[in-house]
Image (cartoon, grey):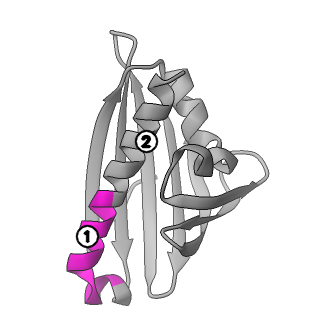
Amino acid sequence: MNVNDGAVLTTSKDIEIQAPVETVWKIQTDIDAWPDWQPEISEAKVAGAIEPGATFVWKSGGLKLTSTIGKVTENNFIGWNGKGFGASAIHTWEFVALENGSTLVRTNESMDGWLVKLLKGMMEKKLNESLATWLNALKQSAESL
């Protein structure tokens, strides 16, 4: 599963977290607990196990989203896609265990659709801020354990 490189908007961010990959993975893939540590997410509920085809409904920044998991490789990769009013997105997360015991987390996202095209500048700024917030919150949560 890859982001759409031809989409109106694509971005990528990464962070090194001083925690084992299993810890970081567990926090990131416990979707129901996202509101406990992710400040922009007020609701999150997955229907079933974390596996391809599972859907989850979540609210981020006041927007209600429905996403479908496309690929999962435990302690290594999770990706999902979703559609909303005038936009579609693909979001992937990679987790790499480093020799020093920490974890490199890399996230990529693409967004497409007429609304993204219309509001590209504003949406690009918001997406980059949101991903930075998410990564920093994941880091803080994992390193506090």
User: Could you tell which of marks 1 and 2 lies nearer the N-terminus?
Assistant: 1
Q: Residue at x 54, y 59 (%)?
A: 41
Boundaries of the magenta span: 116-129
Residue type indicated by callout 2: Ala
Give percent across and percent down for residue 97: 41, 20
The quadrant holding residue 90 is: bottom left
Q: Residue at x 69, y 45 (%)?
A: 50
The quadrant holding residue 74 is: top right
Left or right side of 113 for 41: right
The quadrant holding residue 54 is: bottom right
Tag nearer the camera, 1 or 2: 2
Left or right side of 26 for 47: right
Question: In the rendered image, which residue does mark 2 sit on?
Answer: 137
Residue type indicated by callout 1: Glu
Residue positioned most to the top: 100
Question: In the rendered image, which residue does mark 1 sit on?
Answer: 124
